[in-house]
Amino acid sequence: MKPTVTIIDYGMGNLFSIKCALDKVGLKSLITKDISKIRNSEAIILPGVGAFPDAIKKLRYLKLDKVIIDLYSRKKIIFGICLGMQLLFEKSYEGKISKGLGILKGKVVKFQTNKNFKKSFNVGWKKIQIIKNQKNKGFLNAKDNYMYFIHSFHVKPGNEQIITSKSSFNGLNFVSSVNEENVYGFQFHPEKSSKSGLNIYKCLKNIIYEKSLQLTKKSRVL
Amino acid sequence: MRNLYSLPKKVEFCSKCVYSNQLPSSIPEYLHKPSREGAKYINFRKNLKGENICSACDVAELKKNINWKKREKELLKLLNKHRRKNGEYDCVVPGSGGKDSVYASHILKYKYGMNPLTVTWPPILYTDYGYENYKNWIEIGGFDNIAFKQNGHVIKLLTRLSIENLLHPFQSFILGQKNIGAKIAAKYKIPLVFYGESDAEYNNPISEFGSTRDHKYWFSNKSDKYYLAGLPISELINKYKLKYSDLKPYLPIEKKEIKGIDIQVNYLGYFLKWVPQEAYYYSVEHTNFKPRPFRTQGTYSKYSGVDDKIDDLHFYTTYIKFGLGRATYDAAQEIRNKHITRDEGLKLVSKFDGEFPDKYLDDVLDHIGLKKDKFIKLLDKFRSPHLWKKEGKNWQLRHRVFD
Amino acid sequence: MIRIIPKLDIKNENLVKGVNLEGLRVLGDPDYFAESYYESGADEIIYHDVVASLYERNIDLSLIEKASKKTFVPLIVGGGITNLSQVEKILKSGADRVFINTAGINNQKFIKKVISQFGASTVVVSIEVVKKKKNYFCRKDFGREETNLELIEWCKKLETMGVVELIVTSIDKDGTGEGFDLDIARQLNKHVKIDYILNGGFSKLEHFTDVLNICKPSGFAIGSALHYSILKHKIGSQKHDGNFEFLKKKTQFNNFKKISINDIKKFLIKKKNIKFRN
């Protein structure tokens, strides 16, 4: 049976935890770098833990960058988590300036430190502020206001309309999640954010189900 | 190869625990001659597969089938017979505030309603945390305690001589610890004495796994045959200008002292299942017992035998004389209790057994007036050739359980 | 927010708990405890293989995988970690962070290597200390081996190495329920700028008040108080040997009264105005 979701294995990311979360909500998944399997899945998850330049290099080496971009053009559901979300953007200033996948307009920059804010890593449970009027399909619930973050870079989308939530660190409001059509990005780790986080994967399950229902309807009509 | 002290010539290891057949059985210390004449070693037998099984492991097997409810009933019967409600002590519990004496005294008093008199033959040199534990036993645990602080000249002399003649630093402690229960019991006319575990669980023949300690350990009529520190008493007295009264505290009780009292020295471990690690938790809970704040040299644990600075040295000398150090004793006990596997035991023995006890050695040697270089030379005198070989500058055991 | 972090000491496939880092009394199945704690609001969970350094062996990765399947909060794993390959395997099995103690004291470069390869936020440095007169000295090998390394001296060194978080354990208080070591709290508050999780001694809610009057840790690690509250006196399938006596005898350990993560969070919200998620 083909997996509903493929978790892209390019050698970086907490793949097993994501799979466990998907198992918990009843979504069939496969951790893989096999291009045909990735193409055939209903949705893809791009995970990521580590440094941007390393990550994009690995994706390119495995030719997965082209696959992801192609799948985006085919309106495949794409989930980017943590570094995975950052990779979806145009460029990052981590290390040398690196080009990202360019699926979403905008850049990735480092948290600034100063004499008042000395830490550069945002680690731990942080409150998110849900941006109203976003079609986030219930991913973010008003009750679930704490998510688990572990990062030192953050995204600055070119189009502010795609921002679905914000959080704050070092006195700065930064973007904690985005959504543009079928692309969803989360700076925090939903698979580590307890029930609030699992809810996000549940909603993924719902939209996959909705999408396949629509396809079935379409094919019936045809 | 020559084997000293009639140690078994061929070194064999138990296939269940980590003991070797060189392990000495307890003998009454006041009959202990330098040649270890009459000494016995742990029983080994071969099972149907031809594997070696030591008697301590056999006892452990027996322990599995014991009906502990029945044993407790026996205990209650015994206690009911002796319990005194008129304010008089009804049992004597010897100890120094270690986990075993805490457990024994506390459970007799607070669970079984007895009125124990605790009795302490103090360690030769208290560790500071050991002394704290002793105080807490009495102050937090809530017991009356008689401590017999030994004549300093005599205990230092005997300890030094027992190292020189027997490489046995612990003898002066053992002698007093084994007889003080009975002696105080006789003086206070309390017939019941309770120690913790039976020696059988460690190294004595199975036949000695009864409820009472064989009276030969604390009572004797053979005064003319006594040896202390490896010397006949008369020689000790003459050579070192001692008096018989100086040595009496180390000797077993005499017939006339126990006239009219039927003293019974018991092992509480016969009636109640003894798990040393759980005794540790028990004493933590009831008397704020603290373990050693660092690993005991020669082994892996921190909660057993931590009150006397000489303890470490004692186990080092068992390593020299019998090839068995503290890690071996500790691991063997835990294997039998099924707390660790034999493989884990082997690892622990290979890591820690025979570690040189330098932490407290200087303190001990200073205390008893023995020069360090003399002590180091002594060590070699007691290494049996059938156990040890010299490789360059270093001594190596010929046979190690983990090889 | 201050994280409430249950700490599970592990030997083989069992949850164990000692006092003053001594004793390996089995309290049950780690899964049962981890899942309960996750369901009742734990912010993070620590798995510590307490005999890894003793037997020179690796933590059982299948335990970490099992924990990942049932708990969806960050998992910190440690015990006997001495090389990068172990770190990689542990992270692949579902852990989010690792903690290092002995290997870091023995070789500071190792800490730098792990930070450089896996990121500073992936590493927590664990410090276990014993009080000697007025100072605290670090121990290696789960409390067994002494060092002359003083607590604050080590903390300051670690700050310069880019370590972002510590877990500081009072060995003297561990498993006693006597309360956190307040002098450690004072020293950390005065001298340490990076985040630290306090561990060792908790049993009553007042213990938090005492500490929070002195310092602000990033988290509290709690062991005995939680474990003794939810344990069940039953023994599952026993693959390995262990001290199961406590479970067999159905004893109580009265140094600890029943307390839950919920009780803890309620108290901290009410008395100390600390914010928590949900």
Image (cartoon, helix red, strand yellow):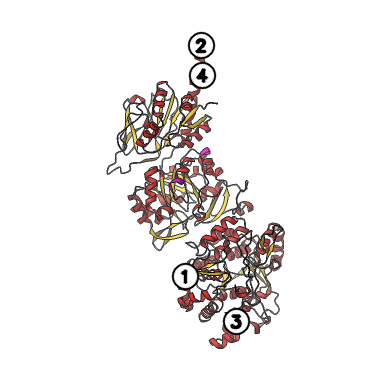
- Residue behind mark 4: A213
Say whether marks 1 and 3 touch (CB < 8 Å): no
**Which residue is the extreme one toward the left?**
A115
**Which residue is the extreme one toward the top?**
A222
Per the model, the C-alpha gap separating discs 2 and 4 is: 12 Å
**Protein chain holding label 4:** A
Neighbourhood count class around disc 3 (C-alpha, 10 Å): few under 14, some 14–19, many 20 upward: few
Neighbourhood count class around disc 1 (C-alpha, 10 Å): few under 14, some 14–19, many 20 upward: few
Element under disc 4: helix
Per the model, the C-alpha gap separating discs 3 and 2 is: 110 Å
Residue B76 at what x, y percent from top left?
Answer: 70, 62
**Protein chain holding label 3:** B
- The image quarter containing residue A8 is top left
- Residue behind mark 3: B248
- Residue behind mark 2: A221
Element under disc 2: helix
Residue A100 at what x, y percent from top left?
Answer: 34, 30
Quadrant (top left/top right/bottom left/bottom right) for the N terminus of chain B: bottom right
- The image quarter containing residue C137 is bottom left
- Residue behind mark 1: B393
Q: Nearer the viewer, mark 4 or mark 1?
A: 1
For this rendering, which residue is in front, C51 or A177?
Answer: C51
The stretch in magenta equals C67-86
On whether residue C81 falls in the magenta region, the answer is yes
Please state which amino acid type lies under the numbered disc 2.
Val
